[in-house]
Image (cartoon, rainbow, N blue to C red):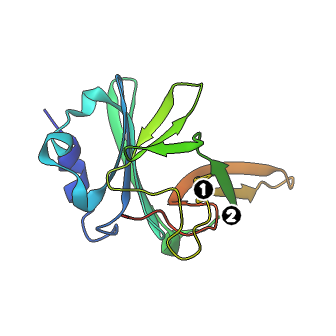
């Protein structure tokens, strides 16, 4: 049975080693970094994954299951033939506790793969909210109507648009 690592290996060298990994399983959501991904997660059977996005500043691998088939693609900015607009999506969470972004009163939590802090070391200002940066890709048809083509995840940033990193 194929696992997540089988697909990741096909794209090595085309995605940054420190790319974000977002795995939507049937029973949990996992946020990790590619260079920190442990063997247990790499060996996840593909039938247990609804969708997986491995993304960095310049490329993204998307893996998903559709009608009992596992599909995957890589998108790199250098191959982009579409127009794009960048969107900032706010991640639910108004507090950081034990390296988890939590939304007090909602039960929502996102566990980060490394130590995160709510205060900037430089100016002690709040880093929240965290945001997911998304490139939306589109083109126009022959009638001039917009056609959405894809959405590519880029990075996770803090309130000051600095990428969320260890520490």
- Residue 53 placement (x, y as % from top left): 41, 48
Give the answer, above or below, for where 89 lies relative to 26: below
Q: CA distance from mark 1 to mark 2?
A: 10 Å
Element carrying mark 2? strand
Quadrant of the frame with the N terminus: top left
Give the answer, above or below, for where 59 lies relative to 48: below
Judge from the rendering whether residue 54 lies leftward or rightward of residue 35; answer left or right: right
> Residue 134 shows which numbered tag?
1
Mark 1 or mark 2: name the one nearer the start of the chain: 2
User: Contact (CB < 8 A) between labels 1 and 2?
Assistant: no
Identify residue for label 2: 84
Judge from the rendering whether residue 61 lies leftward or rightward of residue 40; answer left or right: right
> Residue 114 shows which numbered tag?
none
The residue drawn where x is 36% and y is 40% is 71
Give whichever of 38, 48 is nearer the camera: 38
Q: Quadrant of residue 124?
A: bottom right
Hey, which residue is sitting farthest right in the picture? 143
Q: Quadrant of residue 16?
A: bottom left
Give whichever of 120, 141 is nearer the camera: 120
The residue drawn where x is 14% and y is 40% is 40
Q: Name the front one of labels 1 and 2.
A: 1
Q: Quadrant of residue 161?
A: bottom right
- Residue 86 placement (x, y as % from top left): 68, 62
Judge from the rendering whether residue 110 lies leftward or rightward of residue 37; answer left or right: right
Quadrant of the frame with the C terminus: bottom left
**Label 1 neighbour load within 10 Å: few <14, some 14-19, many 20+:** some
Hey, which residue is sitting farthest front in the picture? 124
The residue drawn where x is 36% and y is 28% is 28
Element carrying mark 1? strand
**Label 2 neighbour load within 10 Å: few <14, some 14-19, many 20+:** some
Give the answer, above or below, for where 63 lies relative to 120: above
């Amino acid at each position: 049975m194929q696992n997540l690592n089988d697909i990741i290996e096909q794209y090595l060298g085309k995605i940054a080693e420190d790319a974000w990994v977002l795995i939507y399983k049937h029973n949990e959501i996992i946020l990790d970094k590619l260079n920190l991904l442990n063997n247990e997660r790499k060996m996840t059977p593909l039938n247990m994954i609804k969708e997986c996005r491995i993304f960095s500043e310049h490329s993204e691998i998307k893996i998903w299951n559709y009608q009992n088939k596992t599909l995957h693609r890589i998108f790199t900015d250098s191959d982009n033939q579409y127009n794009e607009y960048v969107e900032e999506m706010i991640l639910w969470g108004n507090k950081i506790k034990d390296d988890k972004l939590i939304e007090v009163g909602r039960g929502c939590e996102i566990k980060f793969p490394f130590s995160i802090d709510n205060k900037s070391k430089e100016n002690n200002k709040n880093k929240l909210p965290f945001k997911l940066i998304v490139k939306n890709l589109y083109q126009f048809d022959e009638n001039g109507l917009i056609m959405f083509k894809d959405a590519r995840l880029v990075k996770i940033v803090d309130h000051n648009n600095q990428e969320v990193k260890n520490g």
